[in-house]
Image (cartoon, rainbow, N blue to C red):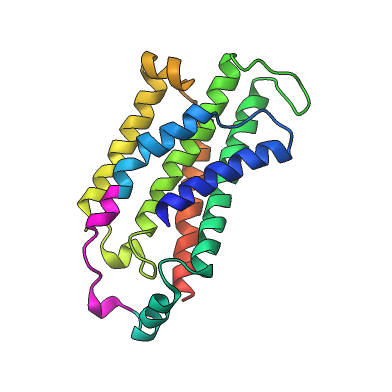
């Protein structure tokens, strides 16, 4: 689910850009930077997730049903679509808001090499890459909240979040990365969108699991 959700959010972000006829909120090289940069270590950390405590597993019937559905059933695809849409919506809003603050609006021409456009795509990138960390925490279990599992029980997952944040900042501030990934530092309003989308993803999963 974790990796597929990231791919879905990238695809939906591009599709929303086409739908609303705006400059592409995300560049191809930035999609690769998510898949091969900020997403790699977190996905590996899920492979060493400790076994769920048996006294917290909600029901054997649910596990049996889940096993019958296979690795991913309809509910899994629906979850991917919902979370991917939340992440993509946050990314597109961050992009448009950043562009609008710089004087651009719908229908106006833009320079793909301008500081404004590069900074705005960086804002969309930051939203997608960091909101995926909320998805990482929630992907540790299909039914249990990170609070029930023990928030810091998987130290590799927590470590990978800090690693991904470090990579994200390197991409934005290191001149070499700025040149080849077309990124620039973003301002506090963009970071507000990053935080808001990350919280939205986390709370969506909390509500979904609570309703089971």
Residue extending farthest right: 107
Q: Is residue 1 above or below residue 178?
A: below
Residue extending farthest bottom: 61
Residue 46 on the magenta span: yes
The answer to whether any part of residue 160 appears in the image is yes
Residue 7 image position (x, y, % from top left): 49, 46
Residue 27 is left or right of residue 70, and the answer is right
Which residue shows up at 74% across the image and 33% down it? 21
Nearest the eye: 157 or 189: 157
Q: In which quarter of the image is the N terminus?
A: bottom left
Residue extent of the magenta highlight: 44-57
Residue 210 is left or right of residue 152, and the answer is right
Which residue shows up at 45% across the image and 75% down it? 69
Residue 13 image position (x, y, % from top left): 59, 41
Residue 146 image position (x, y, % from top left): 33, 61
The image quarter containing residue 91 is top right
Which residue shows up at 76% across the image and 29% down it? 106
The image quarter containing residue 48 is bottom left
Residue 136 is left or right of residue 203, and the answer is left
Residue 188 on the magenta span: no
Q: In this view, does 154 lie above or below 29?
A: below
The image quarter containing residue 50 is bottom left
Residue 178 image position (x, y, % from top left): 43, 18
The answer to whether any part of residue 183 appears in the image is no
Q: Is residue 114 above or below residue 207?
A: above
Which residue shows up at 39% across the image and 67% down it? 142
Residue 190 is left or right of residue 24, and the answer is left
């Amino acid at each position: 689910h974790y990796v597929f959700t990231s791919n879905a959010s990238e695809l939906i972000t591009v599709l929303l850009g086409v739908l609303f006829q705006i400059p592409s909120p995300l560049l191809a090289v930035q999609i690769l930077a998510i898949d091969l940069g900020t997403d790699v270590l977190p996905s590996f950390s899920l492979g060493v997730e400790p076994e769920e405590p048996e006294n917290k597993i909600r029901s054997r019937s649910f596990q049996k049903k889940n096993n019958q559905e296979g690795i991913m059933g309809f509910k899994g695809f629906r979850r991917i679509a919902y979370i991917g849409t939340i992440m993509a919506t946050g990314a597109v809003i961050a992009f448009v808001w950043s562009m609008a603050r710089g004087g651009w609006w719908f229908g106006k021409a833009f320079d793909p090499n301008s500081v404004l456009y590069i900074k705005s795509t960086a804002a969309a990138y930051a939203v997608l890459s960091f909101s995926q960390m909320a998805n990482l925490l929630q992907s540790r279990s299909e039914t249990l909240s990170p609070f029930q599992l023990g928030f810091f029980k998987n130290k590799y997952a927590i470590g990978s979040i800090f690693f991904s944040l470090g990579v994200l900042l390197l991409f934005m501030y290191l001149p070499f990365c700025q040149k080849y990934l077309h990124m620039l530092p973003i301002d506090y309003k963009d970071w507000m969108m990053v935080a808001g989308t990350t919280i939205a993803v986390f709370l969506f999963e909390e509500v979904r699991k609570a309703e089971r």
